[in-house]
Image: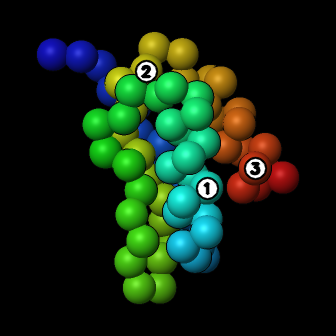
Amino acid sequence: MHAVSMVYLVGNFNVYDVNTFNEMLIKMKADLEISAFLYKNCTRLEAIIKEQNIDKIINALHKKFIR
């Protein structure tokens, strides 16, 4: 069994945001267990990642979606 981290963003998201979120995780070579998916009135983006160094991923997502 491997340790996992859950990445969770809350807001109002569209299909572009969901795709951007997933593409960023893929480009950072995150070992995804579950990635985000679009649903009606999307208010959160989630991913479960097998990742030892989660700080790099959190910082990149924060820079893109929060700042």
Residue wearing tag 2: 51
* Secondary structure type for disc 2: loop
2 or 1: tag closer to the N-terminus: 1
Residue wearing tag 1: 20
* Secondary structure type for disc 1: helix
User: How far, Cα to Cα, is label 1 from label 3?
Assistant: 9 Å
Residue 39, by quadrant, is bottom left
| Residue 25 drawn at (x, y percent) | 53, 38
The total number of labels drawn is 3
Point out the image quarter for the N terminus: top left
Q: Nearer the viewer, residue 57 or 3?
A: 57
Answer yes or no: do the residues labelled 1 and 3 have beta carbons within 8 Å? yes
* Secondary structure type for disc 3: helix
Q: Residue type at mark 2: give it.
A: Glu
Q: Is residue 54 above or below residue 66?
A: above
2 or 3: tag closer to the N-terminus: 2
Which residue appears at 71% of the width and 33% of the height? 59
Q: Is residue 6 above or below residue 15?
A: above
Q: What is the crowding at mark 1: few (fewer than 14 residues within 10 Å), some, or many (at least 20)?
A: some
User: How far, Cα to Cα, is label 2 from label 3?
Assistant: 20 Å
Task: Find the residue positioned furthest to the bottom.
Answer: 40
Answer yes or no: do the residues labelled 2 and 1 have beta carbons within 8 Å? no
| Residue 51 drawn at (x, y percent) | 43, 21
Residue wearing tag 3: 64
Q: Residue type at mark 1: give it.
A: Thr
For residue 7, the mark is none
Q: Residue type at mark 3: give it.
A: Lys
Q: Nearer the viewer, mark 1 or mark 3?
A: 1
Q: Is residue 66 above or below residue 58?
A: below
| Residue 28 drawn at (x, y percent) | 58, 28
